Image (spheres, coloured by chain):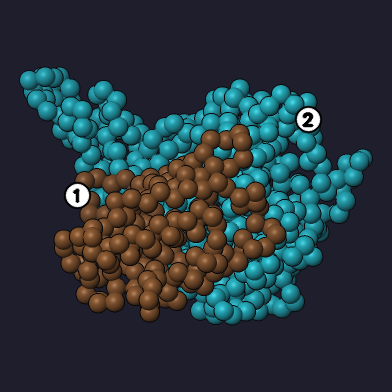
Chain colours: A cyan, B brown
Amino acid sequence: MIPAHIYNDGELFALEKERLFSRAWTFVGHESEIPHDGDYVVRRVLGDSFIISNSEGDVRAMFNMCLHRGMQVCRAELGNASNFRCPYHGWSYRNDGRLTGLPFHREAYGGDEGLPRAGQSLLPAPNFASYNGLLFISMDPAAEPLEDFLGDFRFYLDFYTKQSAGGLEVRGPQRWRIKANWKIGAENFAGDMYHTPHTHASIVDIGLFREPKAQKRKDGATYWAHRGGGTTYKLPPGGFEERMRYVGYPDEMIGRIKDAWTPRQQRMVGEDGFMISAATCFPNLSFVHNWPKLPGSDRVLPFISIRLWQPISENETEVCSWFAVDSAAPPQYKQDSYKAYLMCFGSTGMFEQDDVENWVSLTTTAGGSMARRLLLNSRMGLLSDDRPVVDALPAESFHGPGRAQVGYNEYNQRALLGLWADYLS
Amino acid sequence: MRKALPSLPFDDVRHLQAHQFLVDEAYLLDAQQYDAWLDTLTDDIRYVMPVRVTTARGAGFDTSPGMAHFDEDKYSLGQRVARFATEHAWTEDPPSRLRHFITNVRAFECDEDAELLVESAELLFRSRGDVNESALVSCGREDVLRRCGNSWKLARRKLFVDESVLRMQNLAVFL
């Protein structure tokens, strides 16, 4: 049972800042956003602004604060620059963070003797690492390595982020603020298959989407592996290629996918018949993979979206939503996939709209005093004696790591909040 | 498409017609009469709202490369409208209270005789429920109106939203 006030509680948000976002790896962007020498984007981890730059192929994350008086040295959110010059007193830094110049160095500081420029650099992020081009910052200098943090969830991350040797390219993000607590979206994407047939009924009504009919959705499995989990759809019978074709991948892409995915990853689709849909990587990074119908036809086409639930406060979240597509995909596929994304997810997406309406309402209600007396029922998938309603899938029916089970349940939401509680306590 | 400067005089009948088109359209959008609104669009409508970004002066761009909030044609706009006609479009049920304010209207001749370039400024006020604050979206519009018989239809719309981070929970409504 979940205390309802955790979705709108200032004291808990202060704890989340102090104990969770100060330690966990959080997503800040993708390498394909800064492909060229000098490219940069500026991203935040809560209140801290970082310049993520490409300097001669090396990608770095630097604290966006001048060493002198603390002004932001970069106030654009993306661009290409060889140097950043602080607007306050003119200290300037190379795009790798090294201090290169300060006005009146000799007169004001006695030159390099008084203040040696060598060794002076914008503060690097305490920890910075990437997986399949996904860039993460941890505010904890002693954080465990990113690969260990992600653990077995990497198996599932690859489905979204490694469909060829070249990996993803992303566009965006679209950014907008919603009056909702950040955990709600993270939980929803992690495992809420139960909401799809109801919340998103209109999408089926208008014939945009083939799948989310109640009967179909509950045939899927949810899985949880270390720091992340997600939902899947059950595919009709067939082998790997047939099933990839069924969700709209052209043969050319399937060929590259087969080279990129391990045999075990392919067996989850080809033998077990499960296709990844939404997922969340703790704490606040989510993914979507869906396959709506193309205009005026029964053909479907997949799209991928990456989603950051950037907390602003206990009752406000900045949503950052990227469109992602395999970099080697044919141009027409990229264009069609992009349009499919815009129709379904993001600031104008028709799935998204109805979700946010619910989450805003939930957050508002969770802020009152009655919410402190209510324990929300989050026991789906468990009988009253905690035995499972449906047994976990055996390894021969589900080749992915972690625990998986078919049907409606809230194992993943509980797993996510379990991690959350571990970090907070 | 090249626009012929200066803007048409405000007493030019084409300016007056363009202005009336925008005000009539604002009424349809406020009232959420979307089927009637779709009828005011040409079949080859392109309706685009790029994502705006903060860039250095001189960067040469201020939109997110390749990314938009809206990038629509008649089919996708029609699907969005069709969704509102279902009983399950929760985000607009109960409906928002909307007001589209249109101002700074300027019309220009362009290289197509049957078309007018029309620029305007728009402020959308949106209020939902009784607890959360209302939301605003401010944007500039660049429209192409095409003469179709005795009336004008909207053939192109480009929306330059003035925020890089929208302060509205979604864009389930049109601008």
- Please provide percent x and percent y for residue B143: 33, 63
Left or right, A25 with reference to A331:
right
**Point 71% across, 36% down: residue:** A418
Which label belongs to residue A374? 2
Q: Residues under labels 1 and 2: Cα distance?
A: 55 Å
Left or right, B12 with reference to B93:
left
**Point 23% across, 51% down: residue:** B59
Corner quadrant of residue A128: top left
Residue A403 visible: yes
- Which residue is nearer to you in this view: B22 or A273? B22
**Point 44% across, 56% down: residue:** B26
Quadrant for the C terminus of chain A, please.
top right
- Which amino acid, mark 1? Gly
Q: Which residue is mark 1?
A: B58
- Relative vertical location of residue A10 with respect to residue B100 in this rendering, above or below: above
**Point 87% across, 48% down: residue:** A388
Write down the chain letter for disc 2.
A
Write down the chain letter for disc 1.
B
Residue A53 visible: no
Neighbour tally class for label 2: few under 14, some 14-19, many 20 plus, Cα within 10 Å? some
Corner quadrant of residue A251: bottom right
- Please provide percent x and percent y for residue A311: 53, 36
- Which amino acid, mark 2? Leu
Which SS class for mark 2? loop
- Please provide percent x and percent y for residue A283: 59, 40
- Please provide percent x and percent y for residue B174: 48, 57
- Number of numbered discs: 2
- Relative vertical location of residue A25 with respect to residue A132 in this rendering, above or below: above
Considering every residue shown, the one lying at the far right of the view is: A385
